[in-house]
Amino acid sequence: MSNLHAKGRNFLRAPVFDWNCRDFSNQFIMARSRLLLLGFLIALSTCCFNTVVLGQTTPENEVSAMKAVYSRLKDPMKNLRRWGKGDPCTSEWSGVICAFDQKDGYLHVRELRLLRRNLSGTLSPELGRLTHVVILDFMFNNISGSIPKEIGNMTALNLLLLSGNQISGHLPDELGYLPNITRFQLDLNNISGPLPKSFANLPKAVHFHMNNNSISGQIPPELYKLPQLIHFLLDNNNLTGYLPEELSMMPKLRIIQLDNNNFEGTEIPKSYTNMSTLLKLSLRNCKLQGAVPDFSTVPKLLYLDLSYNKLNGTIPTNKLASSVNTIDLSNNQLDGTIPSNFSHLQRLQNLSLENNYLSGDVPTDIWQNLSFASASKLLLNFQNNALTNIAGNLNPPPNVTVLLEGNPVCRRANELDITRYCGNQTHTREDLPNTSNRTCPSVNLCPVSGGYEYVPDSPDGCICSAPLGVGFLLRSPGISDFPPYFEMFRHYITSNLQLDLYQLQISTPFVWEKGPRLRLFLKLFPLYTEDQFNETALQDLVDKLATYTIPGNDTFGPYDLLNFTLSGPYEYYDVIPTSSGMNKGVLAAIVLGSISCVAIIIMAIMFIFLKVHPKKQKDQEQKEKTATVPMKVDGIQRFSFEELSKAADDFTDRNQIGQGGYGKVYKGMLADGTVVAIKRAEQASLQGQKEFFTEIELLSRLHHRNLVSLVGYCDEQNEQMLVYEFMTNGSLRDILSGNDGAARYGNPLNFRVRLNVALGSARGLLYLHTEADPPIIHRDIKANNILLDRKYNAKVSDFGISRLFSEPDTDGSVSAHVFTNVKGTPGYVDPEYFMTHKLTEKSDVYSLGIVFLEILTGLKSISHGKHIVQEVLTACQEGQMFSIIDRNMGAFPSECIEKFIALALRCCEDEGKARPTMLEVVRELEDITAMLSQSDTITSELDSSGSAIPGSLSLSIYRRSTYTSGNDLVSGVIPTIRPR
Ligand SMILES: *[C@@H]1O[C@H](CO)[C@@H](O)[C@H](O)[C@H]1NC(C)=O
Ligand SMILES: *[C@@H]1O[C@H](CO)[C@@H](O)[C@H](O)[C@H]1NC(C)=O
Ligand SMILES: *[C@@H]1O[C@H](CO)[C@@H](O)[C@H](O)[C@H]1NC(C)=O
């Protein structure tokens, strides 16, 4: 189970085409042709009735606003895929959802969904120009700075979701001008200053969730004008002044939660007892004084917490609403006796009266009428009062806890037989009831690593399917004990998500957090007929949860979405859609709208033609299946053949910059001026479509400064192309061979640059081995695949033949290595891998070692039939180590070179075990770099003959037996090298 955000990666993924799942692909294709038809119809109607619609775009001011928003954000984990490039609506910026507006013919940014994307930086005032945005969600990031007053211009804004950041500064008055806002979710920030009076003018505001900030000053009495407000959550702030009695005039207010503020010396307004809608009043630790108001007139009350104040007088004796489950009046200065009016409360869970001055009898009938659920428990905490007697016989059932310690009555504990209530007991909460009647096989037949789990209660018995994990917080529940409400909660969630009961599991233990708030982890399972959610179903669930469409529930109060856990088959889904996730019909219309009307009509005719010739249609489908399988990858652009052909000047030879087993590589310039490298597969390329998509899918998820980034791809007209960022300085091989002409003008690769290239390559590979999830073995590391950018930083390229670690074998178990046909390039292939066919990350270490030797010597991995390892070892053996160092390298400190050669040769050990790990390689290179920086004076320089031998030679000891060069097994015994 991998919690994606915990791994610091974007947990919102593009749905990647699942190659192992035929059904899915067929469905996809069918859905696609239906979509196409829909698209035709929409596009045709657009065409015929709205004159011509060509290439819809986003208005310029929104594009620039989005770019400004981006410029203020810091995105260390590179979670804002595609941001900053092109148009936010048509270039698939992740988390940006757009909609097409019929009225003005533009696309508009409609939602920014950026929950938990590890973002920092600040919110740009330019947000104010996004006047079509309905949802602004930056929850649980590290955004700092203040809320720009310009947000007040986002007139369409419905949900302002900024919980869980570092936002400071005041709440701008301008937020009170948002005519459509329903939800302010600003809790868990550092917001200070007053609650603006202007907030009283919000006609649609339903939720004020602003707890856990430093909001100060008086609560504006004007807020009573809020016609729709139901949740007023400002606990844990720095509010002062008094509690306005006017709040009771809010017609819909259900929850007032203001704990941990400071209303020193003021009283609880009597008017609050007249609120016909009030469910929960929580005023813990607010320095309130005066009497406890009589809440018997509140008809639906569930939860009353007035603890930790300075309330005095007696406890009102009128009967409370029978719905009440929690009464906490503890830690006040209440006197008098415990009234008898609690005994009719059938749902009571918690009556806390401890630390007061209550006297008289301990009632023994409070639990008489309890009748709710079998899991019900009741806590009666009367500790530290002045209770002197027991009214009758104290003999509660086991699920009722009575605490009497610290009362005078406990001095007679033995006599009254109440010792067990006088001890220092604590009320323990139980885990959730086990609702399953079935048990699944204890042998784990479910592929655990695949993110699958048993669903015991499905109509089909124990099935194995992959859940969507949801972190869910009840932020102000109206109960203090959850198990009795467990079933109710399951019904509440499943009915609103249109799931069957068995499709929801609630993980135990659940956690009560300060507040108190209840943190739950839900697992939502697909229908029992499926083993995983299809994309649409998953998307639907995520949309419902992320946009707060589950209606509030009186018992459970407002909820918050904390995270999604997408593992197993969903790992690569971007469930917060990119801009392409907008209404699919609209998308199709846009796509087609950019084609001319004539073309559409021709296509429509063709479509009809194909329909009346089923065989041809079948052929067409067949072709679609094999030639143009659609896929969506977050952050990766899909190019048409025309676009790329234009970019590369019809793929003229002049633009060819490389050639691989896969095909030719061309330099090209995209319409927006970006220079790219286009890898065009040859028709008869051995790399199948599978490899093609493997590479796209892998690359789209990998982001590291030492990896070449994928910009886009093209898969049409029997063409497969990959579009990469262009590397100005070509490949390491080119530069070492002087192919680029650089040598003529003085080879730029001095020792420091070479060391940096080595380090960069190693870091890129370390990322692949350890950070990528699942880890990736490159399998084809060679100097041709190390590219250099403008500043000669190394970037590893070509993941075309990468294979994933931990790929399940056919029997479903996971082995530590992957059995596979040997792939790679002669000269670089790990001899152990070659012999055993067992691929491990040490194979990459070997190949990288070869690259290091090339960096050091300038030689090719195999030249004149000799393998580079053999060459270097021979030189070392003859004490001529420095004679094989590349003459173009210039000056270098000998001890650095020695260490580097030693490292390279260790990487090239025959046995994987003997080679360092990639991490060790990186560490060692970092050490050498540090050493280089320290040696201000160059200690050794090659003379023109290239045969200079420096003084201290302290090579480590190598003993080698056999090694392979490519497919040839070469043997040789290498003697120990000793310092002179
Ligand atoms: C709360 O307000 C008081 C004065 O009203 C001030 O001294 C204190 O620093 C404030 N606390 C915070 C956390 O802002
Ligand atoms: C409650 O306390 C206030 C002052 O804190 C005092 O004026 C009042 O008389 C007290 N009431 C009772 C019933 O003790
Ligand atoms: C306590 O447990 C019994 C038996 O399990 C049950 O009937 C009752 O409803 C439970 N709840 C309370 C609060 O007594």
Image: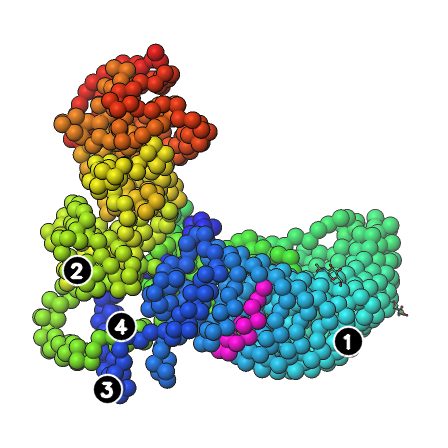
Tag nearer the camera, 2 or 3: 2
Residue 147 highlighted magenta (yes or no)? yes
Contact, mark 3 vs mark 4 (Cβ under 8 Å): no
Determine which residue is flagged by label 2. Answer: 649
Q: Are marks 4 and 2 in contact (CB under 8 Å)?
A: no
Q: Provide the secondary structure element on which disc 3 rests.
A: helix
Quick check: 744 left or right of 793?
A: left
- Residue at x 71%, y 56% (from the top left corner): 401
Q: Looking at the picture, which amino acid does disc 4 mark? A: Val
Query: Disc 2 versus disc 3: distance between alpha carbons?
Result: 35 Å
Q: Residues within 10 Å of mark 4 (few under 14, many from 20)?
A: some
Q: Which residue is depicted at the point 79% across and 64% down?
A: 287
Residue 880 horizontal side relative to residue 418, left or right: left
The answer to which image quadrant residue 722 occupies is bottom left
Comparing labels 3 and 1, the label whose residue is closer to the camera: 3
Q: Amino acid at mark 2?
A: Asp
The nearer-to-camera label among 1 and 2 is: 2
Disc ID at residue 269: 1
The residue that appears at 24% across and 59% down in the rendered structure is 669
Circle 4 is placed at which residue position? 591
**Circle 1/circle 2 CB separation < 8 Å:** no
Q: CA distance from mark 3 to mark 1?
A: 65 Å
Can you identify the residue that label 3 sits on?
Answer: 48
Label 3 vs 1, first from the N-terminus: 3
Does the image show residue 218? yes
